[in-house]
Amino acid sequence: MTGLDFLIRAFGDAFRLILSGDPEVYGAVSVSLQVAGTATVITTLLGIPLAFLIYGNRFRGRHLVITFLNTLMALPTVVVGLFVYAFITRRSILGPLDLLFSKKAMIIGEVVLALPIVIALAGSAVVSLDRSVKETARTLGAGPSRVLATILWEGRLAFATAVAAAFGRLIGEVGVSMILGGNIAGVTRNIPTAIATETSKGEFSLAMALGIVLMALALGVNFVLRYAQGRGESP
């Protein structure tokens, strides 16, 4: 079998698995969507208010906080996973909660991973909009709540981009999932960890099917975001 024949066969088998509703494929997809989706929602609810707090105010140590956030954005996912593991392992502070090797542990790790991304990207929008919107709103006699609402509305596309970037980062990460979730089949095995496992076993068709689904999810998020941006820019 030539290399081209192998690829054609692998893609064909992958699409058959997807179209047949293979439980291994959709089990991993379900875990990925549950964990990444929940982590993205939590990150959004925490990250956007923190972006306003950090980037919209002047306080002692602000530049140090921003530098720390930028450093966290560059950390490998395995380092984030190891850091969270140190807190939730059964011999540690949060050990009695029995979080390790569960979806809850994966969600915690992914929130830590994505939070700096949302804060930084949303913070850039806050900085760019804060001054101009405040000046205009004050001229019109608007109060603080009205100013905040205006900034949220004017920066909605930038905030949506921050959320989409966080989800895109989380749906494909493997380090946090492997360390905190344990890659347990049917429980914590998601798309990236399943791809790694199946590839190491030589099950390229299943790994390819999961890769196709992962690409489809990433493309779907980007298409929705581009559509929203186009709608936002139209008169």
Image (tube, helix red, strand yellow):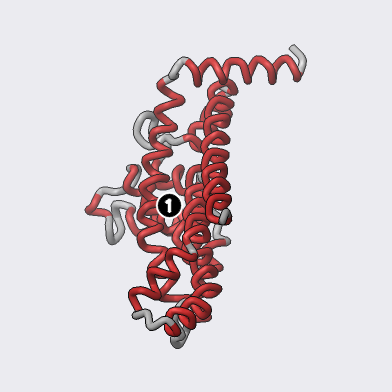
In the displayed image of the protein, which residue is found farthest to the bottom?
60
* Closer to us: 196 or 39: 39
Q: Is residue 196 visible?
A: no
Residue 174: x, y in percent?
Answer: 51, 43
Q: Is residue 149 visible?
A: yes
Quarter that holds the N terminus: top right
> What is the secondary structure assignment of the residue under circle 1?
helix
Residue 119: x, y in percent?
Answer: 47, 65
Q: Quadrant of residue 188?
A: top left
Residue under the image location 39 percent in, 33 percent down: 30
Quarter that holds the C terminus: bottom right
Count up the numbered dots: 1
Residue 170: x, y in percent?
Answer: 48, 48
Residue 10: x, y in percent?
Answer: 63, 19
* Closer to us: 115 or 125: 125
Residue under the image location 52 percent in, 66 percent down: 120
Say left or right for 173 vs 1: left
In the displayed image of the protein, which residue is found farthest to the top?
1
Label 1 neighbour load within 10 Å: few <14, some 14-19, many 20+? many
Residue under the image location 36 percent in, 29 percent down: 186
**Which kind of residue does numbered mark 1 sit on?**
Glu
Q: Is residue 96 above or below residue 34?
A: below
According to the image, label 1 marks what residue? 110
Residue under the image location 55 percent in, 67 percent down: 71
Say left or right for 158 vs 98: right
Q: Is residue 58 above or below residue 7?
A: below
Q: Is residue 14 above or below residue 223?
A: above
